[in-house]
Image (cartoon, rainbow, N blue to C red):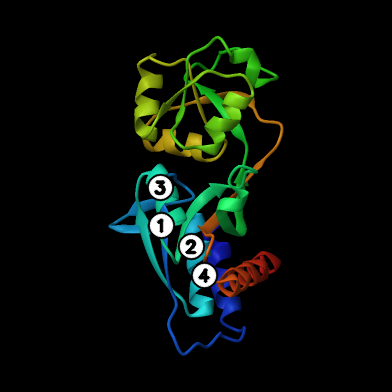
């Protein structure tokens, strides 16, 4: 994936660069959710971060990236101009709250166990009697609740992992890519026991009052990136 991004950068340099008398600055908030977005040596990194940075560079926009709690990222984006947050699931409940750029990536929702021999479930509701950990202000957790699960919402992902390891919860609900990746960074092996029927797209969600021209240009550049890839 990183090789592809380097190739994209080279090819995008051949396209005409946007010009603007006034430098547009965007404030982009996210959380610790590798490999899509995470902090590295004092900077915000990750695959989705790199895609957004590519688009900003092409448009000659300034981007100020910051990792903050997920609920706060959503609040800031709803109340402050020229702000966005990512990697956000685009849901009907969120649709009118933001303007959308993307999708950046996608993944399924899964239930994870530390036991490789844990029973497998065809549907989430089959695990409705188990103790399940999820995240606060999270669309994946909302999906699990809608499927009949009782989920304890925790603000920080590492706390969920610690609770899973200590058997304070039976299963952890997370993304099919992000979940195992984060667990591996914590020297844990986790095993999926149930998977959502559909994949969820991850987007850049921007303030509802942001200039539609900015949104359109960002989407156009990202579409060019997808064509190249």
Question: Which label's residue is closer to the chain start, 3 or 1?
Answer: 3
Outermost residue, top side = 129
* Mark 2 crowdedness (10 Å alpha carbons): few <14, some 14-19, many ≥20: some
Question: Badges 2 and 1: C-beta atoms under 8 Å apart?
Answer: yes
Q: Residue at x 62, y 19 (%)?
A: 148
Tag 4's secondary structure?
helix
Residue denoted by label 3: 31
Residue 228 lies in quadrant:
bottom right
Compared to residue 195, the image places residue 50 above or below, namely below
The answer to whether the residues at label 4 and label 1 have Cβ atoms under 8 Å apart is no
Cα distance between the residues tagged 2 and 4 = 6 Å
Task: List x then y, in percent, for residue 93.
Answer: 60, 42
Rendered image: mark on residue 45: 1
Front one among 132 and 190: 132
Identify the residue under disc 4. 54
First in residue order: circle 3 vs circle 4? 3
Are circles 2 and 4 on residues that touch, CB within 8 Å?
yes
Q: State whether residue 32 appears in this view.
A: no
Q: SS at mark 2?
A: helix
Front of the two marks 3 and 2: 3
Q: Nearer the viewer, residue 203 or 92?
A: 92
Q: Is residue 119 visible?
A: yes
Which residue is tagged 2? 50
Say what secondary structure mark 3 lies in. loop
Please tell me which residue is depicted at 55% across the width and 71% down the height of the picture.
Answer: 211
CA separation in Å, label 4 and label 1:
12 Å
């Amino acid at each position: 994936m990183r090789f592809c991004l380097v190739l994209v950068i080279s090819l995008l340099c051949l396209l005409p660069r946007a010009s603007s008398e006034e430098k547009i600055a965007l404030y982009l908030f996210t959380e610790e959710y590798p490999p899509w977005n995470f902090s590295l040596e004092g900077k915000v990194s990750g695959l989705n971060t790199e895609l957004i940075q590519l688009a900003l560079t092409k448009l000659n926009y300034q981007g100020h990236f910051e990792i903050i709690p997920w609920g706060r990222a959503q609040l800031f984006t709803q109340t402050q101009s020229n702000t966005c947050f990512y990697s956000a699931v685009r849901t009907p409940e969120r649709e009118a709250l933001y303007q959308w750029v993307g999708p950046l990536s996608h993944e399924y929702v899964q239930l994870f166990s530390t036991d490789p021999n844990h029973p497998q479930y065809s549907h989430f509701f089959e695990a409705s009697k188990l103790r399940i950990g999820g995240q606060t202000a999270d669309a994946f957790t909302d999906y699990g609740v809608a499927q009949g699960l009782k989920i304890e919402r925790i603000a920080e992902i590492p706390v969920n992992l610690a609770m899973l390891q200590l058997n304070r919860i039976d299963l952890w609900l997370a993304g099919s890519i992000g979940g195992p990746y984060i667990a591996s960074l914590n020297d844990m092996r986790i095993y999926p026991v149930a998977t959502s029927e559909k994949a969820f797209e991850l987007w850049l969600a921007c303030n509802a009052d942001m200039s539609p021209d900015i949104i359109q240009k960002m989407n156009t550049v990202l579409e060019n990136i997808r064509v190249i890839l």
